[in-house]
Image: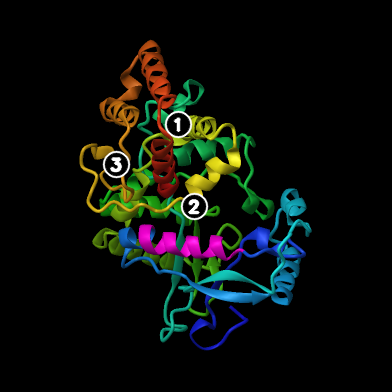
């Protein structure tokens, strides 16, 4: 973070793209303050001591313009997305500064500069989809992990990621998220070995000098002995700590899957008289409504931090989720019946119930 000194010097600055592309910027303080409140009240209690609560900083419009210019000239924005970075002038309430968040940068830990390695891992969902409202056309989700599905789509050139712009993907990554989150050290080590062998955008290693030593762009700066040492050390650390189990508990809040989230969101829009902006505002900005005690009636949401609303349809839907198991052994007709029954229940959810399900789904991501 180059616009500061002292405690903030060298930290990571996070600014929304929308705040960099407006020539007359409106106040964004509500969004930033809510974001930090969300991290502090919802995320941090579930990941501590493995997470930090960001700080805030004010940026002048000149600083915002400079950041926008640097972002465009960095070469890191894919060509297909550059149109989204054009400056617009849709503000009706210009201000003199915007708020941004500042987080710790663990690539260089204060007091331990040039003394160790820093490794970034982007773990993907460590569970198999278990929602009864997966779209019938998407039931491969019951057979493959989300990561494996993504790799297959990349291999067939059906989807493209921004990081692929400067990378040549010669083969799929065999990383196993189920093994990574298994709690078993050999399986964790095997999953990590797959990432070291084909990191794509899911693993990066910084060396003692703070330079990239291993990533999808840099593959040859680590000798095999260093890869082996880092792999085994990481597996040992992750096995002895409970950070992965904490992350997995948050991931398992995805009881409706993305397909179900679409159905629930459409139901919420319907209850908002077709106003999508209102529906999104309710999910993003409604009071956090943190539960005072664990939600134990339904085990599938026992880790939910949110207060469950009273809604008969919600209880019925969660009962369907709890009863749904081993989908790969079921006939198509049985899966169709369960899907249509569960989807019909979604159409009876109350507004608070929709918000509750969507907030848990978003947290699981």
Per the image, is 149 magenta?
no
- Decide which of tag 3 and tag 2 comes sooner along the chain: 2
Q: Main secondary structure of the magenta part?
A: helix
The residue at the far top in this view is 333
In the visual, does 357 lie left or right of 304? right
Look at the numbered discs 3 and 2 and tell me whether their residues touch, using CB distance below 8 Å. no
Residue that label 1 marks: 260
Residue that label 2 marks: 285
The magenta region covers 28-42
Mark 1, secondary structure of its residue: helix
Residue that label 3 marks: 301
Residue 63's quadrant in the figure?
bottom right
Seen from the viewer's position, the closer of residues 331 and 40 is 40
Instruction: Name the spot of residue 13 as percent of width and height, x first.
Output: 57, 71
Q: Label 2: few (<14), some or many (≥20) within 10 Å?
A: few
**Which image quarter is the N terminus in?**
bottom right
For residue 19, above or below residue 144? below
In the visual, does 354 lie left or right of 184? right
Instruction: Name the spot of residue 136 as percent of width and height, x first.
Output: 47, 21
Structural distance between the alpha carbons of marks 1 and 2: 21 Å
């Amino acid at each position: 973070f180059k616009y500061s000194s002292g405690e903030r010097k060298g930290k990571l600055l996070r600014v929304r793209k929308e705040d960099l592309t407006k020539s007359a910027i409106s106040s964004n303080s509500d969004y930033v303050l809510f974001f930090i409140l969300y991290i502090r009240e919802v995320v941090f209690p579930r990941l501590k001591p493995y997470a930090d609560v960001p700080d805030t900083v004010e940026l002048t419009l000149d600083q915002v313009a400079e950041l926008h210019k640097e972002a465009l000239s960095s070469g890191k924005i894919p060509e297909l997305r550059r149109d989204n970075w054009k400056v617009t002038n849709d503000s009706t309430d210009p201000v003199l500064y915007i708020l941004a968040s500042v987080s710790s940068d663990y690539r260089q830990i204060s007091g331990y500069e040039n003394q160790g390695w820093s490794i970034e891992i982007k773990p993907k969902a460590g569970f198999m989809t278990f929602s009864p409202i997966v779209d019938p056309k998407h039931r491969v989700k019951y057979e493959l992990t989300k990561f494996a599905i993504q790799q297959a789509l990349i291999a067939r050139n059906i989807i493209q990621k921004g990081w692929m712009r400067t990378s040549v993907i010669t083969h799929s990554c065999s990383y196993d998220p189920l093994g990574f989150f298994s709690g078993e050290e050999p399986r964790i080590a095997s999953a990590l070995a797959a990432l070291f062998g084909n990191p794509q955008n899911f693993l990066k290693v910084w060396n003692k000098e703070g330079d990239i030593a291993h990533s999808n762009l840099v593959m040859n700066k680590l000798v095999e002995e260093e890869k082996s040492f880092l792999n085994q050390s990481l597996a040992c650390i992750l096995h002895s700590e409970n950070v992965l189990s904490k992350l997995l508990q948050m991931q398992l809040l995805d009881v409706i899957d993305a397909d179900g989230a679409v159905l629930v969101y459409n139901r919420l829009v319907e209850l908002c008289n077709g106003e999508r902006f209102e529906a999104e505002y309710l999910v993003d900005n409604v009071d956090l409504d943190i539960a005072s005690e664990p939600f134990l009636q339904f085990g599938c949401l026992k880790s939910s931090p949110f207060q469950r609303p009273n809604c008969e349809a919600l209880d019925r839907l969660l009962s369907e989720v709890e009863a749904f198991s081993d989908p790969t052994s079921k006939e198509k007709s049985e899966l169709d019946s369960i899907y249509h029954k569960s989807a019909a229940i979604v159409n009876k959810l109350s507004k608070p119930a929709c918000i509750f399900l969507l907030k848990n789904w978003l947290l699981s991501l």
